[in-house]
C-alpha cells in the first residue's frame, strides 16, 4: 500500500505533547474516490481545541489533525465526475484531517477551487472568509455606509471581515487587545481596509463618542472573544441591531446588559460555518456562489490570505506552539 506522512494524535491533551508525525497507509482508490496531494493547511483555533478534547465535536482516535487546507488531485476513480487530475480541492466539511501529505478522499467530501488564486488563500478560504462572508450577509441588511463592529479584529475571521466589508463599502470598527506593537498592527489592518482600529480599553472610555460623530453606530457586532469584550460591543450597537457570536477566545460567557435588551432590543445570535455548510450540502449552489464571489475578490486584490507564517510539516512542534501563543498576529500554515 502507498503511505503518507500525517500529524496524528492517539489521545487528547496538549497538542505539542500528543501530536506526532507518523506514516499512515493510504487505502486503495475506490471508484468514487480521489487521491489528493495536500499542499498547505492552516492551524486554526478549532484544530487546537479538537486535539485538546474541548471542541463541540471530536473525531474518533487516532485522528489526523487539521480541518481545512488545499490539495491537488493526483488520481481519480473510474466514476468520479466533478473532479479531474490537477484540480485544487478543499474539504466540504470539518473533520477530514488535513495535516498530511496525501489522502484518499470521497469525491463528495471535497469541493474544487480555481487554481489561479494564491495557494495560501486557497488553504485558508473554506473557514475564515466563509464565516466572515455569511456573518456579513445573513444577519443584517447592510448597505454601503453602514458600520460593523468586531473584536479579535486581527484574527483570520477578523481580517476577512475587514476586507469583505471594505469591498462592500461598509465601515468596520475593529477592536484588538493592546500590545507593544499596537500602531504597527493598526496600520496593517488599515492597509487592508479597516476604517477604525481601537484597543479594548478605548472602547470603554468616553472618547469613543468622538468616533461615532464620524461613523454611524453599528447595526452588526461580530464577537469572537466573549466575556467583557462582547458586552462592550453590545453597548455600541444601534437599536434593533444584532450581535453574532462565532468564537470564544477568552473562554468567558457573554453577558448581555439588561439595558441593551430593554432599550435597544438587540438580537443575540450565534453562527457556526460547519452547520451552514451541512445545511447547504444537499445543493452546491449557495456554497459554490460564495466561493466564486470570494475568489473574485481575491483576483481583484480585495481579499488576501491572513497574515501567516509558512512552516514545513516536519516543524509541526514549533508551529503548534506558536499557534497557541497570544499576540502572534500570524496564522501558522503547514506546507506539505
Ligand atoms: P486566529 O488564530 O486567526 O486568531 C486568533 C484571535 O484570537 C486573535 O485575534 C487573537 O488576538 C485572539 N485571542 C487569542 N486569545 C485571546 C484571548 N484570551 N482573549 C481575546 N482574544 C484572544 O483565529 P481564527 O480567526 O481562525 O478564529 C477566531 C475564533 O473564531 C476562534 O475562536 C475560532 O474557533 C472561531 N471560529 C469560528 C467559526 C464559526 O463558524 N463559528 C469559524 C472560524 C473560526 P491576539 O493577537 O490579541 O492574541
Image (cartoon, rainbow, N blue to C red):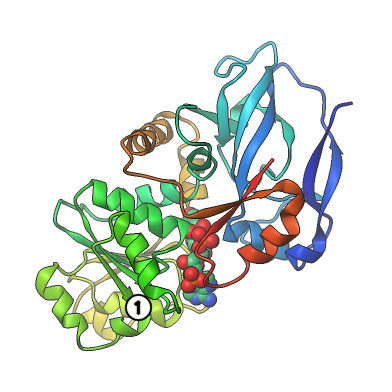
Residue lying farthest to the left in this orientation: 213
State the image quarter where residue 172 is shown.
Answer: bottom left
| Spot occupied by residue 135 in the image (x, y as percentages of width and height) | 35, 54
Residue in the foreground of this view, choosing between 90 and 37: 37
Residue at 21 percent of width and 52 percent of height = 141
Q: Is residue 268 above or below residue 167?
A: below
- Secondary structure found at label 1: strand
Instruction: Indicate the quadrant containing the N terminus: top left, top right, bottom left or bottom right.
Output: top right
Q: Residues within 10 Å of mark 1 (few under 14, many from 20)?
A: some
Q: Is residue 31 above or below residue 22?
A: above
Instruction: Indicate the quadrant containing the C terminus: top left, top right, bottom left or bottom right.
Output: top right
State the image quarter where residue 69 is shown.
Answer: top right
Q: Is mark 1 within 8 Å of ligand 1?
A: no
Asked if residue 241 can be seen in this view, the reply is yes
Residue at 56 percent of width and 28 percent of height = 88
> What residue would you read off at disc 1?
199
Residue at 71 percent of width and 51 percent of height = 65
| Spot occupied by residue 199 in the image (x, y as percentages of width and height) | 35, 78
| Spot occupied by residue 127 in the image (x, y as percentages of width and height) | 50, 48
Residue lying farthest to the bottom in this orientation: 206
Amino acid at each position: 500500500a502507498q503511505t503518507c506522512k500525517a500529524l496524528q494524535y492517539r489521545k487528547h491533551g496538549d497538542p505539542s505533547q500528543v501530536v506526532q508525525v507518523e506514516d499512515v497507509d493510504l487505502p486503495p482508490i475506490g471508484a468514487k474516490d480521489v487521491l489528493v496531494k495536500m499542499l498547505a493547511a492552516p492551524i486554526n483555533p478549532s484544530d487546537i481545541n479538537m486535539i485538546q478534547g474541548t471542541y463541540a465535536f471530536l473525531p474518533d482516535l487516532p485522528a489526523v489533525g487539521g480541518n481545512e487546507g488545499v490539495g491537488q488531485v493526483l488520481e481519480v476513480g473510474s466514476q468520479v465526475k466533478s473532479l479531474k487530475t490537477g484540480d485544487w480541492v478543499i474539504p466540504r466539511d470539518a473533520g477530514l484531517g488535513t495535516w498530511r501529505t496525501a489522502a484518499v478522499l470521497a469525491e463528495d467530501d471535497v469541493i474544487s477551487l480555481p487554481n489561479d488564486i494564491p495557494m495560501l488563500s486557497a488553504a485558508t478560504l473554506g473557514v475564515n472568509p466563509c464565516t466572515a462572508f455569511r456573518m456579513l450577509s445573513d444577519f443584517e441588511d447592510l448597505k454601503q455606509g453602514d458600520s460593523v463592529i468586531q473584536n479579535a479584529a486581527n484574527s483570520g475571521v477578523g481580517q476577512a471581515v475587514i476586507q469583505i466589508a471594505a469591498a462592500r463599502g461598509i465601515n468596520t470598527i475593529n477592536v484588538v487587545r493592546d500590545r507593544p506593537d499596537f500602531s504597527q498592527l493598526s496600520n496593517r489592518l488599515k492597509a487592508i481596509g479597516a476604517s477604525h482600529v481601537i484597543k479594548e480599553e478605548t472602547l470603554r472610555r468616553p472618547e469613543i463618542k468622538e468616533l461615532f460623530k464620524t461613523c454611524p453606530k453599528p447595526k452588526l457586532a461580530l464577537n469572537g472573544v466573549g466575556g467583557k469584550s462582547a458586552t462592550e460591543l453590545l453597548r455600541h450597537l444601534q437599536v434593533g441591531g444584532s450581535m453574532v457570536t462565532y468564537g470564544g477566545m477568552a473562554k468567558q460567557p457573554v453577558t448581555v446588559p439588561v439595558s441593551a435588551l430593554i432599550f435597544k432590543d438587540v438580537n443575540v445570535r450565534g453562527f457556526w460555518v460547519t452547520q451552514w455548510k451541512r445545511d447547504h450540502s444537499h445543493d452546491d449552489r449557495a456554497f459554490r456562489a460564495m466561493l466564486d464571489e470570494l475568489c473574485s475578490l481575491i483576483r481583484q486584490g480585495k481579499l488576501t490570505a491572513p497574515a501567516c507564517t509558512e512552516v514545513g510539516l516536519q516543524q509541526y512542534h514549533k508551529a503548534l506552539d506558536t499557534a497557541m501563543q497570544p499576540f502572534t498576529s500570524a496564522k501558522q500554515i503547514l506546507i506539505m
